[in-house]
Image (cartoon, rainbow, N blue to C red):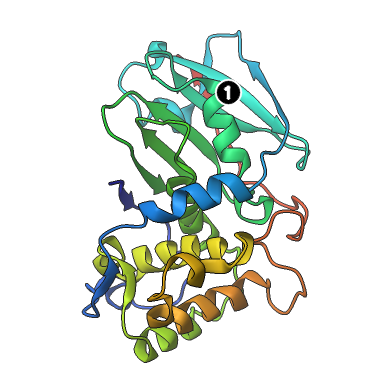
Amino acid sequence: MRYYTAAFLFSSLALAQDKWQTRLTKPAIHPNLDFVEQGLQVNLPEISFTATKWNNNLIPKECKDRVGNANDFDIYDIRYYDCGDPWVLCHNRNSAASVDTIARQFSKVPIGMRQWVRVLIDVPSTGTSAYNSGGTIYISGANGRMISVLLHETAHSTMQGGFPNDNFNDLFSGYDKDVGVPDSYAQTNMIENLAQVTVVTIFDLNVPGGIAKVDPDSWKMQNQINAMKKYGKMGGSTTSLHIPGQDKPCVRHFQLGDIVSK
């Protein structure tokens, strides 16, 4: 079971927070979405990359402000072939997962979504969890099977401007029409439901047979899936940011911010 939390900026959303943060009352279709992990692992391609370690005793302030002892962290530029700008990984050297493992998992996030992530931070933990704050994804207990976690957290980043700015009215309408939400965590509020519906939508678009092949109850959330597919078209585009190789090129990147001494 993976647990997610999210704390992110609402700067691109003009809705009252209570509409987003109220607990949802429709039933969960599943206890969790662990059953989609294997299909996503197999069908989302790894993007080739290089990892270059910083050797100057510096660290992004964004990382230093979120960790205990900055000296426990090695800083890497992760440069994927599908974007000119690198992502920064603040890697706790005591973590069980290697830089290579984390970079490979993150590479599977389609670039149209991945480009909205500012920086990655990983720390050791016995379980796997993550949260997103302002485009920074903080991962506890990173491992080689966490693509559903990364897709969920990246969806929070994408909310900040990756979708057309229509306040997600179709998602709310889809929820009203549907029988339920993807899983128990999606019931937390519409913020988390959007992220979980994004995970299901990416599965539906990239795994042969789609979500219906592995989930006969997927019809219970079909209107929400359809809404996310619409948003993935980036305001009328014929391609989707949810499908690797179809999404927009890497056209923007969160600013990393200040670089400071460890």
Relative to the observer, which residue lies in front, 35 or 227?
Answer: 35
Give the residue at x 28% y 46%: 1
Q: Taking 2 as reference, is 155 left or right?
A: right
Q: Amino acid at mark 1?
A: Asp
The residue identified by callout 1 is: 100
Relative to the observer, which residue lies in front, 169 or 42?
Answer: 42
Q: Taking 247 as reference, is 12 left or right?
A: left
Relative to the observer, which residue lies in front, 48 or 203?
Answer: 203
Q: Quadrant of residue 180?
A: bottom left
Secondary structure state at the residue bearing disc 1: helix
Against 157, residue 171 (above or below) is: below
Q: Quadrant of residue 248?
A: bottom right
Give the residue at x 63% y 60%: 206
Q: Quadrant of residue 95?
A: top left
Identify the image quadrant of the C terminus.
top left
Against 25, residue 206 (above or below) is: above
Which percent across, then down, holds residue 101? 53, 27
Which percent across, then down, holds residue 153? 44, 51
The residue carrying pointer 1 sits among few (fewer than 14), some (14 to 19) or many (20 or more) residues within 10 Å by Cα, namely some
Give the residue at x 54% y 59%: 158
Against 184, residue 154 (above or below) is: above
Which percent across, then down, holds residue 123? 36, 25
